[in-house]
Every structure is written in structure tokens, then in C-alpha cells.
Amino acid sequence: MINSNEIIETLVDLQRQTEELKQILKGEIIETAVDLRIKRQTEELKQILKDAERSYESKMKEALHEFKENLTITLESMKAANKTNYENKDKVNTSLNNRVLKEVAHKKISTQSTQHRAFISGKANDGNLDTFSHTAMNAKTSFWEVDLGREFKIKQIEIFVRKDCCGDLIRQLDILVGPSHNKLEKCAFYEGPAQTGFHLVFECPHIISGRYVMIVKGVSTNLALAEVKVMAFEENSYS
């Protein structure tokens, strides 16, 4: 015969287990709901980040595009400006190149400070590189000068150094040009020393109207010149 107390205890135990099961099931449901909410929020956050990234990329692309356009405009402006500068330089160079330089000192009247033996001043502008002018030895001041007969638009002076020796004596030279002796201005200065056989070319800083060209040596030794050429613009090419 079943004891009523045992039945009651069994029912109570079943009831307790049932409540425990309900609590377990209730906890699992709560846990599952939390997981779903977190997952949903995570997905929402990811979407927000994606949208922000797309927006950032879009803005960056727009900014980059605008920068490229501005850079292109700037580069084109610089190219145009450079092209204009080059065209202007080409015009100037073409204008200068169209002017004809000619030698104007050949066999013109020349003088020198002193004379050594038979080496007269005219040997420096006779067109012969094997001859040369020569001032006296150990003179305090030495110079060579040519009178062109009239004024020329002088741009360049050329000096040919002796071919046989003594090139190092060509040094400390002032090259002066002017319309008269009291209006000489410096075309160039040569520190030197040169070497035997040198061909020296001096371009004046600007075109000088001159009749006289003088080469003055600033140290007390002789001055020997194989040839001096004075280059001037043709009158009809200078305008």
C-alpha cells in the first residue's frame, strides 16, 4: 500500500523540479534575447560605420578631384607663362642674332705706350697671328690703343695671345671703350694669366658707342699682343 506521505513528497519534488526547469528555460530565453539585441546593435553599428566610410571616401574623392582640377589649372597657367617668357626670349635672341657683327679694327691707326725693338703697335691689328706688338721691357705702365676713325656700336673685343711664348704675361688687363679719351668706360677686365696661343673673347655688358679701344695692363711688365679684334654691329642691323 502506497504511503500518502511519499506521494506528497514526490509531488512536491516534481513541482520543485518543474519550477527549476521553468527557471532554466526562462534564463535561456532571456539570454537568447540579449544575444539577439547585441547582434542587432552590432549590425546597426557596422552599417553606420560603412555609411560613414562611404561618405568619407566620397568626400575625399570630391576633395581630391577638386585639388587635381586646381592643380591642372595652376600648371596650365605656369606653362602659359613660361611659354610667353620663352617666346619673348626667342624674340630678343632672334633680334640679336639678326644683327650682324663685323670686325672694325683691322689696319686702323693704333698706338702703344712704348715700343720694344721693331714690334710696332700695328702688328696687333694687321690680320696676321704670326706677328705681334710689343711694349718696352719693365715699363711702369703699358697700353695699346686703336682709333677706329669714327664711332661704332661695339659689343665684343677679342685678343689673340702670342703663339711662340709668354702667354702668362697677358694678365691684369682693363679693356676700355669710348667715344673719346675722356669718356672711356670699362668693357671688361681680364685677371689672367693667359697661356701661349690663347684666344680671349670679352663681351661688353652692354653695347658701347665708341671710337677708341684701349687695352691697359695694370702691372709693370711689357704688353705683347698678337692680334686685337673689335666686333661691332653693322649700322643697318642695329636699329
Image: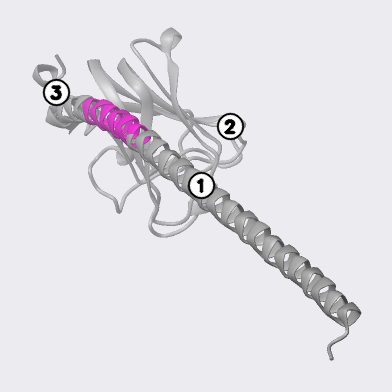
Which one is closest to the eye, mark 1 or mark 3?
1
Q: Earlier in the sequence, mark 1 or mark 2?
A: 1
Q: Secondary structure at mark 1?
A: helix
Q: Place residue 182 in its image quadrant.
A: top left
Q: Earlier in the sequence, mark 3 or mark 2?
A: 2
Q: CA distance from mark 1 to mark 2?
A: 93 Å
Residue 203 x/y as whole percent:
36, 32
Q: Residues within 10 Å of mark 2 (few under 14, many from 20)?
A: some
Direction from residue 221 to residue 199 in the image, left or right: left
Q: CA distance from mark 1 to mark 3?
A: 88 Å
Magenta-drawn stretch contains 67: yes
- Amino acid found under the numbered disc labelled 2: Gly
Q: Secondary structure at mark 3?
A: loop
- Amino acid found under the numbered disc labelled 3: Glu
Where does the magenta region start and end?
A: 66-85
In contact (CB < 8 Å): disc 3 and disc 2? no
Report the front residue among 38 and 74.
38
Q: Which residue is mark 3?
A: 234
Q: Main secondary structure of the magenta part?
A: helix
The disc label shown at residue 44, or none:
1
Q: Give the residue displayed 28% in from the left and 29% down from the top.
A: 73
Q: Residues within 10 Å of mark 1 (few under 14, many from 20)?
A: few
Which one is closest to the eye, mark 1 or mark 2?
1
Q: Earlier in the sequence, mark 1 or mark 3?
A: 1
